Amino acid sequence: MSSSTIPIWLKSLAWAALTWNLFGVIAFIIQMMMTPEMISKLPLDQQTAYSNIPLWSTIAFAVAVFGGTLGCLFLLTKNALATPTFALSLGAILLQQYYNFVVINSLKLLGASAIFMPIFVIIIATTLLCLSIKGKQQGWLR
């Protein structure tokens, strides 16, 4: 295997990560399409959270999911831009989680179960960033 050939396990992981990030894109689109009528059917505390999402948090959500998706495409095409793209996505995830956990206190709003998905998202984003860094070091990405 030459140094520029991406290992099969990494290609498989990148395809799985692309699928994961596309689910994030779908979640973003659903959130953007939520109408006031849809929001009114949520519990009162969640209505407040969804009705008052600041623009910066929405932008962070968009950068997180579209950046993760683009990073996966870069990884699959052996492009070293995967690393800064994954770094940007991870930064946006952390900013978005600041809103969720500090600004609206989603633990109080939704309970302890609200922490599992954000932690999982951060772990996946960090892993993808680390894999892209390793890919540059190994010559898999150019």
Image: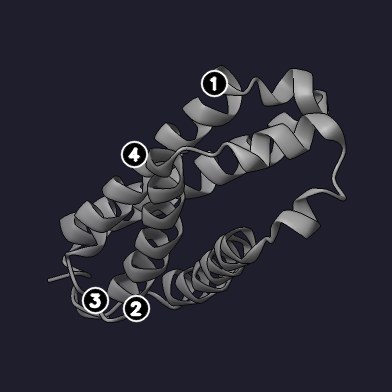
Vertical comparison of 50 with 29: above or below: above
Q: CA distance from mark 4 to mark 2?
A: 22 Å
Q: Give the x, y percent position of residue 80.
A: 17, 65
Q: CA distance from mark 3 to mark 4?
A: 22 Å
State yes or no: discs 3 and 4 in contact (Cβ < 8 Å). no
Which residue lies under the disc numbered 4? 91
Q: Give the x, y percent position of residue 33.
A: 62, 66
Q: CA distance from mark 3 to mark 2?
A: 5 Å
Q: Residue at x 82, y 48 (%)?
A: 40
Please tell me which of labels 2 and 1 falls first in the chain.
2
Q: Amino acid at mark 1?
A: Val
Please tell me which of labels 4 and 2 falls first in the chain.
2
Name the disc covering residue 103, or none.
1
Query: Circle 2: is it few (<14), some (14-19), or many (20+) Cα within 10 Å?
Result: some
Nearer to us of marks 4 and 2 is: 4
Q: Residue at x 45, y 70 (%)?
A: 14
State yes or no: discs 3 and 2 in contact (Cβ < 8 Å). yes
Q: Residue at x 79, y 58 (%)?
A: 38
Name the disc covering residue 78, or none.
3
Q: Nearer the viewer, residue 87 or 45?
A: 45
Q: Nearer the viewer, residue 98 or 16?
A: 98
Q: Amino acid at mark 2?
A: Leu
Please tell me which of labels 3 and 4 falls first in the chain.
3
Q: CA distance from mark 1 to mark 3?
A: 38 Å
Number of numbered discs: 4
Nearer to us of marks 3 and 4 is: 4
Which residue lies under the disc numbered 2? 76
Query: Circle 3: is it few (<14), some (14-19), or many (20+) Cα within 10 Å?
Result: many
Name the disc covering residue 68, or none.
none
